[in-house]
Image (spheres, rainbow, N blue to C red):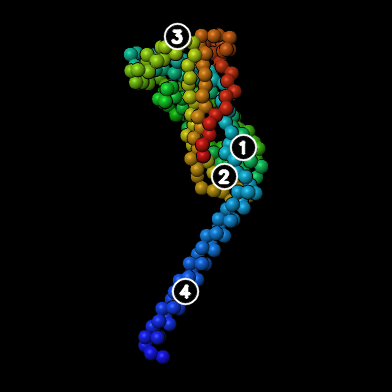
Amino acid sequence: MTAKDCGAHHLDERKKLFRLAAVAVLAFVLLILFIIFLVWLILRPTKPRFILLDATIYAFNISGPNFLTSNLQVTLSSRNPNARISIYYDKLDVYAAYRSQQITLPTLLPADYQGHKDINVWSPFLYGNAVPIAPYLADVLAQDQMAGTLLINVRINGRVRWKVGTFISGRYHLYVNCPAYISFGDKNNGVPVGPAVKYQLVQNCHVDV
């Protein structure tokens, strides 16, 4: 065998090894994807469901040219719809927003655990004393209050982990948006609680994980 034939033979061997390695890598990737699909098919993971149950308004008014004071307490419930997956709520920050602008400081909820089909309930206070707002918002707020109805969004930013058996996943970002329609003009829509007014809402929230 000549040196040229020997070199060609070695080249063919390398090509075969590369093909075998590529096939092995492809088979491994397909196996991992199949396992992930099978786990998903068995577990059917579903994101938690949040409901804004009520909101108690202690203060919501303009305090100065472009400052908004808003103090309220909200009641939120979360349900884990999964039958085989538990949820760790590692961090949940709750705040209120008006016309896409944050109007209260974030309130940190305690870390919590949610078992299969369990329901958790939180009732945080949200405070925003003399928060600067865009000049146009003061006019829009005055118009909404004159109309008797305004929309406040109660939002949650957090981190969650999933637990399946003894396996615990990494942290995932949780974003929840709960619209609260407050009718200031009609007192029949709220229940007086001392100097405050409590509104029963039972409003479904939009959840992204």
Q: Disc 3 or 1, which lies upstream in sequence?
A: 1
Depth check: 21 or 163 in front? 21
Residue 202 screen position, x and y as percent: 59, 23
Q: Residue at x 48, y 67 (%)?
A: 22
Q: Is residue 89 visible?
A: yes
Kind of residue sitting beneath label 1 = Asn
**Numbered disc 4: secondary structure:** helix
Report, in whole angstroms, how far the alpha carbon at label 1 lies from the one at label 2: 11 Å
Q: Residue at x 44, y 74 (%)?
A: 15
Residue 191 screen position, x and y as percent: 58, 12
Q: Disc 3 or 4, which lies upstream in sequence?
A: 4
Report, in whole angstroms, how far the alpha carbon at label 3 lies from the one at label 1: 40 Å
Q: Which corner quadrant holds the N terminus?
A: bottom left
Residue 45, quarter of picture: top right
Depth check: 145 or 8 in front? 8
Side of 105 where 85 appears, left or right = right
Q: Disc 1 or 2, which lies upstream in sequence?
A: 1
**Numbered disc 3: secondary structure:** helix
Tell me: residue 177, above or below residue 12: above
Residue 165 screen position, x and y as percent: 63, 49
Q: Disc 3 or 2, which lies upstream in sequence?
A: 3
| Residue occupied by mark 2 | 162
Q: Disc 4 or 2, which lies upstream in sequence?
A: 4
Depth check: 200 or 115 in front? 200
Of badges 3 and 2, the one in the foreground is 3
Q: Disc 1 or 4, which lies upstream in sequence?
A: 4
| Residue occupied by mark 1 | 80
**Numbered disc 2: secondary structure:** strand
**Numbered disc 1: secondary structure:** loop
Report, in whole angstroms, how far the alpha carbon at label 3 lies from the one at label 4: 78 Å
| Residue occupied by mark 4 | 17
Depth check: 82 or 119 in front? 82
